[in-house]
Amino acid sequence: MRIALPSARPAPAGSFAPAFLGTVALLVAALALLTVWRDPYWIFRDDPPWTHNGVGASRLLDLEMRLVKPLQIARLRPQTLLVGSSVVYRGLDPRDVAASAGRVYNAGFSSLMAGELPTLAALAVEAGSVRRVVFALDYFMFTALPPPPAIRPQLATAAGRTEAIIATILNPEAPGHLIGRQFRRTEPGLWHGDGYKATPDFDAELTRRVTQEQKIAAMAYRPGDLADLDRALDLLRGREVILLLSPMSGAQRELLRAGGRAEELAAWRRDVAALAARRGLPFHDLVSDHPFDDFDPEKGSSPYWIDTMHFKPALGRWVLSRIGLAGAHAGAAAPSG
């Protein structure tokens, strides 16, 4: 007698696709939740789990600050923006700014060029909270120096930032950016959630290399780039704007002189001063009007300079004092002699 075993019933036609799509949806949702919780781009909250009291090493901020920082500005809604290059994000600490300035964000970007200033101005306006912008300008911003990829203008719009946030959440590599080998950063120092980067001293080998790698031959002044600053200032009408030319070390000024750029540097200083006067804006030319010439690239970092280009917060506090924004605890006396 043969006993008939029940045969497996074939799956209903079309059931595989919904199951597969449901699995994919669950994986995507889990990835999104992990990314938001881990917050490797530091765009969702003040203290992601990989930071300690709002301070941490971040390869993403080193490499993708032109994405991260606009998203941070939109979330934090600061009242004061400190705009400039890496000189700003290393040298001006928001904790040294007077409390009357409200929430301060350090909008310093590596190798920021003049052409990016209108985008930052549009972002400041769109954020709605910004009432004061400090432009700390550097000579190279207005030269033929090959620029990095610019800040995307779409990040100055809510729709563009939403698209960018979704892209970071759904990026399969996002959770791993701060795990294992990818935790290694490209530059020394620790980022703060307000855009400032605390940078350790450099040894003599590194300061010599920074000095030697200056692309002075490419730093031909382009007066037409001042139109980008003008456009940014047009967008910021009705807000307080301070223009300053960042302090330059004696070593950096000597590099420009030896490279035949001294006259162009002087012309740039005159042109920005004239633009500020035409617009009736506060203006501070601190390129050489400072007593902080203690740096020697053959000896490593000095008390006031990290390297040839970048000053320390000790000098930054003096800058804030000169422009009237230093907090009561941030007074920095000039060196004697």
Image (cartoon, grey):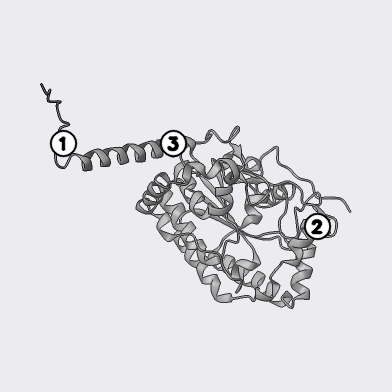
Estimate the x, y position of residue 268 in percent, counting from the top left. Answer: 64, 72
* 279 over 90 or under it: above or below: below
Q: Is mark 2 on a helix, strand or loop?
A: helix
Q: Name the residue under label 3.
A: 34
Within 10 angstroms of label 2, few (less than 14), some, or many (20 or more) residues?
A: few
Amino acid at circle 3: Leu
Q: In which quarter of the image is residue 213?
A: bottom right
Q: How crowded is mark 3: few (under 14 residues within 10 Å), some or many (20 or more)?
A: some
Closer to the camera in the image, 39 or 6? 6
x then y, percent, for residue 215: 68, 70
User: In front here: 213 or 281?
Assistant: 213
Q: Are marks 3 and 2 in contact (CB under 8 Å)?
A: no
Q: Position of residue 83 (x, y in %)?
A: 57, 55
**CA separation in Å, label 2 and label 1:** 72 Å
Camera-near label (3 vs 2) is: 3
- Image disc number at residue 205: 2
Answer with mark 3 or mark 2, whichever residue precedes in sequence. 3
Which residue type does callout 1 highlight? Pro
Q: Name the residue under label 1.
A: 10
Q: Residue at x 70, y 49 (%)?
A: 316
Q: Is mark 1 on a helix, strand or loop?
A: loop
Q: Which residue is drawn at 67% across and 59% down?
A: 246
